[in-house]
Image (spheres, helix red, strand yellow):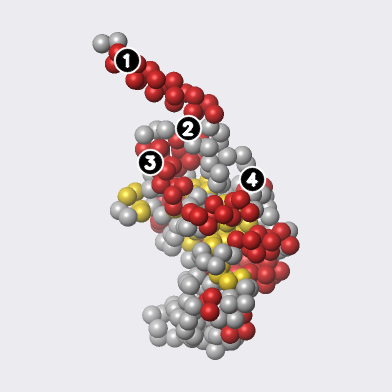
Amino acid sequence: MRRWLIIPIFLLILYVFLAIRAEPVAPHLYYTNLPDRPLNIAHQGGEHLRPSNTMQSFEHGVALGVDVLEMDIHSSADGILVTIHDDTVDRTTNGTGHVNDLTLAQLKSLDAGAYWTDDDGATYPYRGQGVTIATLEEIFSAFPEKSMVIEIKQAEPSIVQPFCDLIGAHSMTDKVLVASFIQPVIDEFRVACPAVATSAARTDTIKFYILQLFRLQNLVSPNYEAFQVPEYFSGIKVLTPHFVKAAKQRGVRVEAWTINDSAEMSRFLTLGVDGIITDRPDLMQEARPTTTD
């Protein structure tokens, strides 16, 4: 009978050993520089209010008083980083083709407001109004004091080093949190730009989710500062009270996306999330409680 005690005793000792060695992530200046309240993160600048990822959407988000601007980046054929969600221009402009195959001049010639409508296509108020694809450098220059979440959408060719260099050149190291669904891309970025905050990629999140299910989150030493996750992923509920609690135990922020309904915003705020990524930052401004910065 005593033989059967060896395995659980060994596992307990192993757990204690690994838990002692594991450390929560240290507070990062990206977050300590932000207000101590649930963050209003304008998804693509607030896509339901202005054309996605454009200067107009970011300007409007800033005017609303959002805490963070969220955007996506690809590179042009001549190596310039631009803010656009898709890997083609087909959906959000009047052009066609892959972003990587078009020069910056070609991208700038497109109408980035052509697609946008808020009345199911009855009107297109930004069509022909001079809305263009923005470069990341233009965004950095326009909003040097604004915090940003920047998602790397492009895996090949890699844009990690030029992106890291641009962050440094504009002194945005403590103003930017970098995200990517693509694990090798975010891993590459963490090596190239270790001083910049990152969010968990898909593999990071899956590992943590499984461990916290078994109440083993104390074994995790996060190399990321935030989880940016939907409530459900592939039918599995991710944003549970325990997931939020477990993440905070490891020093990791939890930011829910993409939440565009006032009642849902209030529900997630009650759950204790640290921020909401939304296409309707105007509603988030109203939904969250008023707090002192």
Q: What amino acid is at disc 1? A: Leu
Q: Which mark is drawn over residue 28?
A: 4
Give the x, y percent position of residue 253: 53, 46
SS at badge 2? helix
Count of numbered labels shown in the rendering: 4
Q: Earlier in the sequence, mark 2 or mark 1?
A: 1
Q: What amino acid is at disc 3? A: Ile
Disc 3 designates what residue? 210
Q: Give the camera-side residue of 79 and 286.
A: 79
* Residue count near mark 1 (Cα–Cα under 10 Å), binned few <14, some 14–19, many ≥20: few
Disc 1 designates what residue? 5
Report the mark closest to the observer, 2 or 1.
1
CA gap between label 4 and label 3 equals 25 Å
SS at badge 4? loop
Residue plotted at (34% across, 20% down): 7
Q: Earlier in the sequence, mark 4 or mark 3?
A: 4
Q: What amino acid is at disc 2? A: Asn
Report the mark closest to the observer, 1 or 4.
1
CA gap between label 2 and label 1 equals 24 Å
Report the mark closest to the observer, 1 or 3.
1
Q: Earlier in the sequence, mark 2 or mark 4?
A: 4
Does 209 sit left or right of 195 as displayed? left
Q: What amino acid is at disc 4? A: His
Disc 2 designates what residue? 218
* Residue count near mark 2 (Cα–Cα under 10 Å), binned few <14, some 14–19, many ≥20: many
